[in-house]
Structure formats: C-alpha cells, structure tokens
C-alpha cells in the first residue's frame, strides 16, 4: 500500500525557514517523480515544485523560485522541501504527491499525503 | 505559462442528476489533463488522466472528454459522496498548473 506522510510544518515568523519532509512507502521511490502542491486556507491547489527520480531535474513555480529547494534521499525514501524567506502568503497546507512515472507526460498524481500545515505569522 | 480556467465556480445539482464541469486551457495541452476530487479536510484524489481515462477504482459515472484547450468532466447520476470540489490540472507544460476549482453542491 502506497503511503505518503508529511511532517515539518508549524508556526513560523516571516523571514523564517522550515524543512518539510515526506516519508514514502509501498512503492519503488526512486522510480517516480515527486511533487509538492500547496493549498492556502480556503483556496485552490497550487503546484510548487517537482523533482525527478534521480534528483537530476527539478522545477519550481515562479512564486517560490530562489526561496524553496526540493530534494530527495532515495536511500531513505524521503522527499524534502526546504522553505526559506517565508512570507505570509506561503501559509498553506503542503501536500506531497507521487507522479505516475519518471519520464514523458507523467506529472499527474495518483497518491497524495494528508499534508502538513505551515503558518507564517508574527 | 498555461492558465487553467474552470467554470462554473459553483454548481448546484440534485441527487441523481448530471453535473457538467468545464476546464479551459490558455493554450493547447493536448490530452495531458487530469481531474481531481477534493472533499473537506481531505487530500485530492485522482479521478481522470489523459483527459478521459478513469483512474483505478473510479466509478463509471465519472467521465472526461476533450483535448487541446477545452475539457469536460461529467458526473452522471450524482451520489451524495460526489459533492466536493473538483480541480483540473495540465501536465503538458512547465510550470504545471491547476484550475481554480468547481464546487459541486447539493441543490
């Protein structure tokens, strides 16, 4: 059974940093792209970042480029999102999501975690 | 950047009726379009990929159609568990993008 479990959220002051984690199980982690999607309170889904299976390719939304860094440790089956220079508008539930492959048009998401809430406030 | 626009924002439908949700892309995304369902307090669930292929375990009352820039999600014979927010997502181009969502509510 595929499971994705996010952690690392919390209350953080503007300008601060967090490291979000997503522990994966039930599939061959290194064979799939992984993605972070966020959802501000009461709002829609926003794609944040994607990393390919070997970590060699990464993509970011313009809204987070230069502030967020996606990474993965395939030996630990864990996805990360380092979030720096946080702003109030970064307040959201952050979901990790599994892609359906590692090449071609496979960046839609068949499994999602339950999310971790990051609240940016002074 | 491909902008995804969903309409209507809210759809009021009676149990047993049909719901038709629209998703439009600002440029062609071929058939690289997915639909998700999200209920309050839950993560999204994949319904449709490739514009028209149902994901594993998705009931046949959910169907998707379209290609290029115009897509439709149809939910036939609405059940109580179908009242939720639905999002489309294109995966043809970077950056990936979601539509703003359509809330399907009980009429």
Image (tube, grey):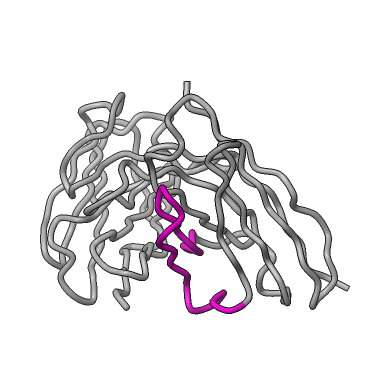
Residue at coordinates 73% horizontally, 77% vertically from top-left? A85
Find residue A32 and report its horizontal and vertical position in percent. Answer: 38, 42
Q: Nearer the viewer, residue B26 or B32?
A: B32
Magenta stretch contains residue A70? no
Classify residue A45 as left or right of residue B88: right
Find residue B13 and report its horizontal and vertical position in percent. Answer: 34, 44
Classify residue A30 as left or right of residue B74: right
Residue at coordinates 42% horizontally, 39% vertically from top-left? B45
Vertical position of residue A106 compared to residue A38: above or below: above
Residue at coordinates 77% horizontally, 67% vertically from top-left? A17
Q: Nearer the viewer, residue A1 or A29?
A: A29
Q: Nearer the viewer, residue A24 or B84?
A: A24
Image quadrant in which the N terminus of chain B is located: bottom left
Vertical position of residue A38 compared to residue A100: above or below: below
Vertical position of residue A92 compared to residue B60: above or below: below
Number of dots carrying numbers: 0
Magenta stretch contains residue A61? yes
Classify residue B40 as left or right of residue A20: left
Find residue A58 and report its horizontal and vertical position in percent. Answer: 44, 64
Residue at coordinates 47% horizontally, 72% vertically from top-left? A61
Image quadrant in which the C terminus of chain B is located: top left
Residue, far right:
A122
Find residue B91 and report its horizontal and vertical position in percent. Answer: 28, 59
Which stretch is magenta?
A45-66
Classify residue B46 as left or right of residue B75: right
């Amino acid at each position: 059974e595929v499971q994705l479990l996010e952690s690392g959220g919390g209350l953080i002051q503007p300008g601060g940093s967090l490291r979000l984690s997503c522990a994966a199980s039930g599939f061959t982690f290194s064979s799939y792209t992984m993605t972070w999607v966020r959802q501000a309170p009461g709002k829609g889904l926003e794609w944040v970042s994607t990393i390919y299976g070997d970590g060699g390719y990464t993509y970011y939304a313009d809204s987070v480029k230069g502030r967020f860094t996606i990474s993965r440790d395939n030996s630990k089956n864990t996805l990360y999102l380092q979030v720096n220079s946080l702003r109030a508008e970064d307040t959201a539930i952050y979901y990790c999501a599994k892609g359906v492959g590692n090449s071609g048009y496979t960046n839609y998401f068949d499994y999602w975690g339950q999310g971790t809430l990051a609240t940016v406030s002074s | 950047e491909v902008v995804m626009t969903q309409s209507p924002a809210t759809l009021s439908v009676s149990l047993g009726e049909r719901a038709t949700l629209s998703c439009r892309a600002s440029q062609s995304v071929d058939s690289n379009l997915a639909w998700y369902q999200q209920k309050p307090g839950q993560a999204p669930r994949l319904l449709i990929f490739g514009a028209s292929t149902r994901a594993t375990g998705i009931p046949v009352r959910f169907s998707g159609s379209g290609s290029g820039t115009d897509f439709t999600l149809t939910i036939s014979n609405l059940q109580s568990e179908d009242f939720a927010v639905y999002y489309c997502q294109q995966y043809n181009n970077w950056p990936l993008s979601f539509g703003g969502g359509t809330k399907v509510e009980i009429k």
